């Protein structure tokens, strides 16, 4: 009699962790943001075409709102908007969303300062919201941002843009726009530094430290 049990399959070997050191220089960060801006422009036009709509003179960008997750997602969103306008000639709405009160570790970490939530005058109802963050790790910060957006309006769609995806997801969340995919170990940290917050643009991978949960402040992710 044939067995209904499938034979064991060899597991896919994990990618080796990235060596500690400088991952992106200031010039690299600029190039990555430019590439992501081009991708956002192309996707905005394609989204309109896919639904049978005319992209129009703005290429569908009037439907897009970039919403940064503080701390470093906020300046990243503003930079992306500036580069999109530089390449397309079309200004893009930008906002920020504070996720502090929506985090699932709030009771474990105690009181922390609230960040501002700002939305464009046109709001987010019926529009394509692109959440912007510096590092995608467990996915819990993005989940918190999705919960926060739910209280602010009803977008037509929500997408995710991140400067660095370091893997180790704990929730079924995937970025639509990724500047750099970086295999890491859980014992490593990915530190994104931006001129608006830290006085310098760079991304570093360091060994040691918790590296198991997304953290805000001095983003050790």
Image: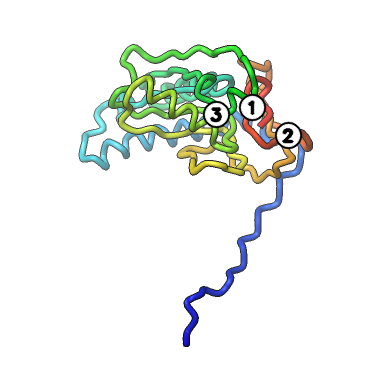
Q: Give the alpha-carbon distance from disc 2 to disc 3, as whole Å.
A: 18 Å
Q: Residue at x 49, y 32 (%)?
A: 143
Bin the neighbour count of mark 2 within 10 Å (Cα to Cα): few under 14, some 14-19, many 20 and up.
few
Seen as rendered, the residue at the extreme bottom is 1
Q: On the rendered image, what quadrant is the C terminus found in?
A: top right
- The image shows residue 169, relative to residue 44, as above or below, that is below
Please name whichever residue, 79 or 142, is drawn nearer the observer in this view of the structure. 142
Q: Nearer the viewer, mark 1 or mark 3?
A: 3
Tell me which residue sits at (31%, 15%) in the image: 122
Q: Name the residue tied to disc 1.
A: 215
Cβ atoms under marks 2 and 3 closer than 8 Å:
no
Residue 104's disc number: 3
Label 1 – label 3 distance at C-alpha: 12 Å
Q: Report the residue at 46% width, 30% height from top.
A: 37
Locate residue 184, reporting x and y percent.
Answer: 68, 44
**Category of crowding for the residue at label 1, using alpha-carbon neighbours closer than 10 angstroms: few (below 14), some (14–19), many (at least 20):** few
The residue lying at 50 percent from left, 18 percent from top is 98
Against 217, is 144 above or below?
A: below
Q: How many marks?
A: 3
Q: Quadrant of residue 23?
A: top right
Measured in 3D between alpha carbons, the distance from the residue under mark 1 to the one under mark 2, in whole angstroms, is 10 Å
Disc 1 + disc 2, Cβ < 8 Å: yes
Evaluate whether residue 79 shows in this view: no
For label 1, the SS is: loop
Which percent across, then down, holds residue 214?
Answer: 62, 31
The spot of residue 204 in percent (x, y) is 71, 32
Q: Kindly state the secondary structure of the residue where label 2 is placed.
A: loop
Which numbered disc, 1 or 3, marks the residue that appears first in the sequence?
3
Residue beneath disc 2: 210
């Amino acid at each position: 009699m044939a067995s209904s049990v499938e034979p064991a399959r060899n597991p896919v070997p994990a990618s080796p962790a990235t060596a500690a050191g400088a991952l992106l220089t200031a010039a690299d960060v600029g190039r990555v943001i430019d590439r992501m801006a081009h991708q956002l422009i192309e996707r905005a036009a394609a989204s309109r075409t896919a639904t049978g709509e005319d992209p129009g003179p703005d290429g569908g960008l009037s439907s897009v709102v970039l919403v940064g997750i503080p701390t470093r997602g906020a300046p990243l969103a503003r930079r992306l908007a500036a580069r999109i306008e530089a390449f397309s000639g079309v200004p893009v709405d930008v906002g920020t969303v504070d996720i502090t009160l929506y985090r699932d570790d709030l009771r474990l970490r105690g009181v922390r300062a609230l960040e501002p939530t700002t939305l464009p005058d046109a709001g987010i109802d019926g529009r394509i919201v692109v959440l912007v963050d510096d590092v995608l790790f467990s996915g819990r910060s993005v989940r918190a941002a999705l919960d926060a957006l739910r209280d602010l309006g009803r977008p037509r769609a929500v997408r995710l843009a991140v400067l660095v995806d370091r893997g180790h997801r704990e929730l079924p969340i995937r970025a639509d726009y990724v500047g750099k995919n970086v295999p890491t170990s859980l014992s490593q940290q990915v530190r994104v530094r931006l001129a608006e917050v830290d006085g310098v643009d760079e991304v570093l991978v360091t060994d040691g430290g918790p590296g198991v949960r997304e953290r805000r402040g001095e983003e050790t992710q």
